[in-house]
């Protein structure tokens, strides 16, 4: 999404919801909406694990860009976050 679209949709939540449903589908957009309402707490060691994971993920993405990769790069999610969200569902 370009900056202009991101800026517009950020200020128009109804339009943003329509955009998400169009791009992700009804099932995935509903799952995302439910996940956005969950409160998940992590211990300090868990936060440190997530921080280390995100630093590694940034290095992976930077390396891909530095070697000429263009376009969308999927960002991975730390396993601990996936496990916690699945446990709270």
Image (cartoon, rainbow, N blue to C red):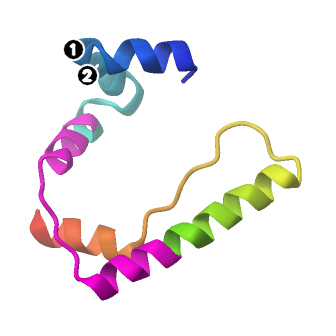
Q: Which residue is mark 2?
A: 17
Q: Secondary structure at mark 2?
A: helix
On screen, residue 36 above or below 46:
above
Q: Main secondary structure of the magenta part?
A: helix
Tell me, for residue 14, which label it has, or none: 1
Seen at 25% across and 43% down, the residue is 32
Q: Percent from the top left, x then y, of residue 72?
A: 65, 39
Seen at 51% across and 61% down, the residue is 76
Residue positioned most to the right: 67
Tell me, for residue 45, which label it has, or none: none
On screen, residue 70 above or below 7:
below
Q: How far is the residue under mark 2 from the one under mark 1?
A: 5 Å
The residue carrying pointer 1 sits among few (fewer than 14), some (14 to 19) or many (20 or more) residues within 10 Å by Cα, namely: few
Seen at 32% across and 82% down, the residue is 46
Q: Percent from the top left, x then y, of residue 34?
A: 14, 45
Q: 71 and 54: which one is in front?
A: 54
Seen at 41% across and 74% down, the residue is 50
Which of the image's four quarters has the N terminus?
top right
Q: Percent from the top left, x then y, of residue 80?
A: 33, 77
Q: Secondary structure at mark 1?
A: helix
Q: Is residue 67 magenta?
A: no
Residue extent of the magenta highlight = 29-52
On screen, residue 73 above or below 61:
above
Residue 25 lies left or right of residue 50; in this view the side is: left
Q: Quadrant of residue 60 in the image?
A: bottom right
Which of the image's four quarters has the C terminus?
bottom left
- Whether the residues at callouts 2 and 1 have beta carbons within 8 Å, the answer is yes
Q: Is residue 36 magenta?
A: yes
Residue 27 lies left or right of residue 72; in this view the side is: left
Q: 1 and 19: which one is in front?
A: 1
Q: 67 and 86: which one is in front?
A: 67
Q: Percent from the top left, x then y, of residue 4?
A: 52, 12
């Amino acid at each position: 999404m370009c900056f202009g679209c991101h800026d517009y949709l950020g200020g128009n939540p109804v339009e943003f919801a329509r955009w998400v449903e169009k791009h992700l589908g009804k099932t995935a957009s509903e799952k995302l909406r439910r996940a956005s309402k969950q409160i998940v707490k992590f211990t300090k060691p868990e936060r440190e694990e997530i921080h280390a994971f995100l630093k590694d993920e940034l290095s992976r993405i930077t390396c891909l860009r530095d070697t000429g990769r263009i376009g969308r790069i999927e960002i991975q999610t730390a396993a601990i976050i996936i496990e916690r969200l699945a446990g709270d569902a």
